[in-house]
Amino acid sequence: MERAVFVYTTYPSLVEAEKAGRTIVEQRLAACVNILPGMVSHYWWEGKIERGEEAVMIIKTRASLAERVRDAVKAGHPYTTPAILVIPLESVEESYLGWIMAETEKAAPG
């Protein structure tokens, strides 16, 4: 069976993350997205340290859809340089993996 991956990204607000996440799930590019509001980030940007409040999104999908998920995130993302990390999963409980595969099987051709 194909492997599952997590795609990790962040958004500047819960509203933006929810809008993007719902679209990704509606397109069947992911079985599920988890949105975790309230993260505080400190990071270098344009030569200085910045602080931002963000929402984390973890996108659960199949490995073969990772590039399409990446493109979907980038297409509507408000950041110039969004964090988009594809994380291969070492082990996934068998029935949960089956659910991810079943729910992403009907992704529209891309």
Image (cartoon, helix red, strand yellow):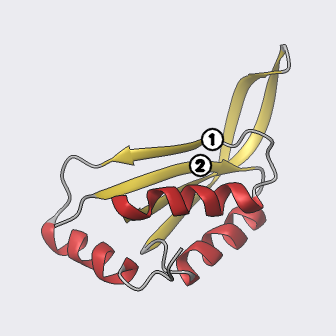
User: In the image, what residue type sits under mark 2?
Assistant: Thr
Q: Is residue 104 left or right of residue 85?
A: left
| Residue pictured at 62% horizontal, 58% vertical | 71
Q: Is residue 14 left or right of residue 62?
A: right
Expressed as whole percent of the image width and height from the top left, the position of residue 32 reads 45, 72
Image quadrant assignment for residue 4: bottom left
Residue for badge 2: 9
**Alpha-carbon distance for marks 1 and 2?**
5 Å
Image quadrant assignment for residue 101: bottom left
- Disc 1, disc 2: CB below 8 Å? yes
| Residue pictured at 69% horizontal, 43% vertical | 82
- The secondary structure type at the circle numbered 1 is loop
Mark number for residue 83? Answer: 1
Q: Is residue 24 left or right of residue 77?
A: left
Q: Quick one: label 1, few (<14), some, or many (20+) residues within 10 Å?
A: some
Using the image as rendered, state which of residue 87 and residue 105 is in the foreground: 105
